[in-house]
Image: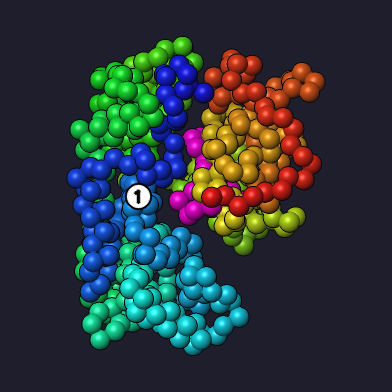
Amino acid sequence: MYLELFKLRELPFRLSPDPAFLYLSKHHARAKAYMESTIWFTDGFVVITGEIGSGKTTLIETFLKELEKEVLVAQINQTQITALEFLQTLLAQFGFQPFKMKKAELIATLNNFLIEQYAAGRRVVLIVDEAQNLSLKVLEEIRLLSGVETTKEKVLRIILCGQPELNDKLNSPQLIQLAQRIRLRFHLTSLSKNDMRAYIEHRLEVAGSQGREIFDPECFPLIYRYTGGVPRLTNTLCDTAMLAAFASDKDRVTPAEVQSAIDELQWVEYSERSVRLPALKVDDAAKEPGAENDAVTDRHPIVVARIVVANAGQAAGEYFLKQGRFVVGRTPDNDLPIDSKYISRHHAQIVSTLNGSVIEDLNSTNGVFVRGKRVRRRALNDGDVIQIGQHELTYMDERQALERPMPDGADDATPWSVQTMVNDIAEPLEPAPAAPQPHEPS
């Protein structure tokens, strides 16, 4: 990678929500303060909304990292669940084995636990990320839990985080009682031009720039035009621009490298695109064979490949890849979320262009395996089977077949943006054992 060239200790623009890289704009600082207020006030819950990539999950991780030890936390990220599953998940977070309990027993156990924690002087916080996916029945259960109280105060603090449609759901007539209990609401907006520049410089400083000017000042207006100040888009563009500079052996990013990255990603200016990023995930639907491909091609004219996900030999879904990044991991903010203890929060990414796709390990605990080898970065060929944790992803190229002859025994690992750097950058790791034993990520 480009760390040595730019004299950095770590990658500055990773997509993972690392609290160390949090940049507190005025809006983010206010949202964080609202979260912190739940520790001291229990007369309602806090709702934080924001567009995809606005930094909600990073705020949550920072908030959790700074909590005192006596605060108990239940964090729920998988939100497409039933009311019964929600209660079971909540109790499981507190160390119970609730999966054989009936609903009445679940509620009684949870209420007793909350009262006991209050009596012991401990505070309990429930944080729900991706809360816009919660059903009305689950939100009603949350409302009922918010009513658990002693003679003095309520005993459960609640933070709901989600995309803007969460507000629409909370404002529905069916949830009027819940809406009345919301004490604070805040919407995270994109970064301003000045904040975006400060955000980029902050992440570079945390990564070890030591005040060195890695991005030419003329880069920032161009970056803002194409990212709109959305943190995740900013990370993607800056990382790609640094790769472009690396390819040219430059230790400074100029507007030329930023433009090269924009061309590589095939982005249009932010003002011309939808506020929301186009979804890469295509849900399994009961369709006639072949109909799904037709529908997806109509919606996504630049589909370049697809992956079929399997677990224990059973197909679990099919996903279509456009040009750009497709991130696989355990949490719901990934393009392909896999709820498995063997999968890291952000495990791997597939980066696709019109010329090909490359899979890259995002410093996962259990690694990425292709053809029996653990790889850091590897160009994908049609039919490759990628092993991530206990899941297998079969890659199927939708482009015309690419002829890429390889020497016998050689790996074709390569940076996705620069084909000429095969031998210099992407050496594969040693072959992995035939049946790797995954470990639970920290």
- Residue at 62 percent of width and 59 percent of height: 287
Query: Quick one: 355 or 441, which is closer to the camera?
Result: 441
Figure label count: 1
- Residue at 51 percent of width and 34 percent of height: 323
Query: Quick one: 280 or 147, which is closer to the camera?
Result: 147
Q: Is residue 265 positioned above or below 111 on the image? A: above
Q: Is residue 320 visible?
A: no
- Residue at 45 percent of width and 86 percent of height: 108
- Residue at 25 percent of width and 86 percent of height: 151
Crowd tier of the residue under label 1, counting other residues whose Cα lies within 10 Å: few below 14, some 14–19, many 20 or above: some
Residue furthest out toward the front: 120
Measured from the top left, where is residue 288 in percent x and y? 66, 58
Q: Predominant secondary structure in magenta?
A: strand
Measured from the top left, where is residue 159 in percent x and y? 32, 64
Residue furthest out toward the top: 249
Q: Is residue 4 visible?
A: yes
Residue, disc 1:
62
Q: Is residue 145 positioned above or below 260 on the image? A: below
Identify the image's colour scheme: rainbow, by chain, secondary structure or one colour. Answer: rainbow
320 relative position to 116: left or right: right
Q: Amino acid at mark 1?
A: Thr
> Which quarter of the figure has residue 394?
top right
Measured from the top left, where is residue 224 in percent x and y? 28, 31
Measured from the top left, where is residue 144 in percent x and y? 35, 81
5 relative position to 295: left or right: left
Q: Is residue 273 magenta?
A: no
Q: Is residue 135 positioned above or below 396 on the image? A: below
Q: Which residues are magenta?
A: 318-337
> For the residue labelled by badge 1, is the local secondary structure a helix, a strand or a loop?
helix
> Which quarter of the figure has residue 377?
top right
